[in-house]
Image: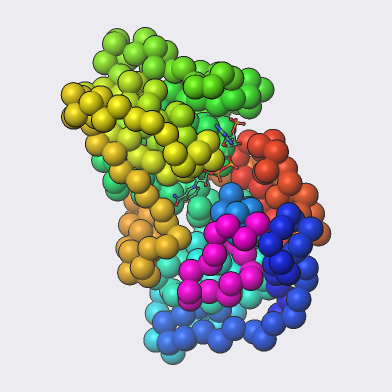
């Protein structure tokens, strides 16, 4: 099979096509022919040599999500058969013609979706669902502050909040990108051009002075202290990304006084049983929302495989709104 591999740490130009033996599915695995994949910040970091792959995947072939067709199943696999259309997350190796995944980590593609629609779903929706619903206990009537709301995860999270009856205040640094936010049901956007960013007053205004119940923080850095100000008493900060920085000075007194909760989370490094549990939960509770039309892919562009490198450059420039999808085969 053909893969796109990292030849040395660097920019997207260090990626090169290579031939590898076809992977062989284990007893409960699926062998999937990749039809589409999508780009992630983690891929950018991995290509630069800053985010090594977990031990169970090829260290030099990035790619965290896929949509494709089952071409073989292990002898103990029961959930899918050859020809089924599946999508899902993998620890790496999705920039390849074929990949192997445990059948309990794969999800059936929503009916009527094509491969490029489906490849836009796993990373952003599983991340948003896991953080907001499973860890944040999202409920109707709550107000959720989402940083970088025009990002892939941000736009998916906003649609999930809308589908759950929650209200969203979203931040971002680009007015043109924020102008799209009403498409995802965002009630109010706050343009954050200055550093440190200021949004707590706007959140209080939107919530009758109370503050947000939850914050999905996709950026970290100097957004964190202001986020603590913007949260309601007993509010919950879900820290998911660090594009704005990994170090910051925080007044722990604010956490204490307001009895706030802080949860930090990643998907990729979790043990397989936790990834399977998330996929199974998403199949039961999230997939029906695609069938009903409440959730949908937010796609910035579908690129041919030859333009994957340009897609990564675009992501690095923060130019995209929603997902950059790559048609593989
Ligand atoms: N923990 C996990 O398991 C997990 C899973 C998936 C993603 N993530 C993280 O979630 C975040 C969003 O991912 P994504 O794939 O949705 O990203 P994305 O679509 O590429 O968008 C990220 C956005 O973040 C904003 N941003 C970039 N640098 C920033 C800075 N210095 N300060 C403030 N905002 C900045 C930009 O939006 P504006 O230009 O509009 O401000 C950018 O478009 C990333 O941090 C990613 O690493 C974590």
Looking at the rendered image, the quarter that the C terminus falls into is bottom right
Give how far across and how far down residue 315 sits, in percent. Answer: 67, 43
Q: Is residue 185 above or below residue 327?
A: above
Report the side of 259 relative to 193 (left or right). Answer: left
Q: Is residue 87 visible?
A: no
- Using the image as rendered, state which of residue 179 and residue 61 is in the foreground: 61
Instruction: Determine the residue positioned at 69% across, 82% down.
Output: 20
Report the side of 91 relative to 239 (left or right). Answer: right
Instruction: Determine the residue positioned at 45% across, 60% down.
Output: 268
The question of residue 63 being in magenta is answered with yes
Instruction: Determine the residue positioned at 18% across, 24% down.
Output: 257
Instruction: Determine the residue positioned at 29% across, 11% down.
Output: 209
Looking at the rendered image, the quarter that the N terminus falls into is bottom right
Report the side of 183 relative to 301 (left or right). Answer: left
Segment colored magenta: 48-65
* Ligand number 1: quarter of image: top right
Q: Is residue 122 above or below residue 149?
A: below
Main SS of residues in magenta: loop
- Using the image as rendered, state which of residue 242 and residue 39 is in the foreground: 242
Q: Is residue 77 visible?
A: yes
């Amino acid at each position: 099979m053909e893969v796109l591999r990292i030849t040395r740490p660097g920019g997207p130009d260090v990626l090169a096509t290579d031939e590898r033996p076809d992977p062989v599915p284990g007893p409960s695995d699926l062998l999937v022919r990749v039809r589409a994949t999508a780009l992630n910040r983690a891929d950018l970091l991995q290509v630069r040599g800053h985010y090594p792959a977990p031990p169970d995947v090829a260290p030099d072939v990035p790619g965290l999500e896929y949509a494709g067709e089952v071409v073989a199943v292990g002898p103990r696999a029961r959930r899918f058969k050859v020809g089924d259309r599946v999508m899902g997350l993998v620890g790496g190796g999705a920039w390849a013609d074929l990949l192997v995944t445990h059948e309990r980590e794969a999800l059936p593609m929503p009916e009527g979706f094509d491969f490029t629609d489906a490849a836009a779903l796993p990373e952003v929706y599983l991340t948003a669902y896991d953080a907001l619903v499973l860890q944040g206990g999202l409920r109707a009537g709550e107000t959720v502050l989402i940083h970088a709301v025009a990002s892939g995860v941000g736009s998916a999270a906003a649609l999930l909040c809308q589908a759950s009856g929650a209200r969203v205040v979203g931040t971002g640094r680009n007015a043109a990108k924020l102008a799209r936010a009403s498409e995802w049901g965002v009630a109010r956007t706050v343009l954050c051009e200055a550093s440190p960013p200021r949004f707590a007053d706007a959140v209080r205004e939107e919530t009758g002075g109370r503050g947000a119940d939850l914050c999905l923080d996709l950026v970290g850095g100097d957004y964190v202290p202001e986020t603590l100000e913007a949260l309601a008493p007993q509010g919950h900060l879900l820290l998911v990304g660090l594009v704005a920085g990994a170090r910051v000075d925080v007044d722990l007194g604010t956490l204490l006084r307001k009895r706030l909760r802080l949860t930090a989370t990643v998907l990729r490094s979790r043990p397989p049983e936790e990834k399977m549990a998330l996929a199974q939960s998403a199949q039961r509770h999230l997939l029906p929302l695609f069938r009903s039309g409440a959730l949908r892919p937010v796609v910035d562009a579908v690129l041919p495989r030859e333009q994957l490198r340009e897609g990564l450059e675009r992501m690095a420039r923060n130019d995209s709104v929603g997902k950059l999808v790559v048609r593989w085969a």
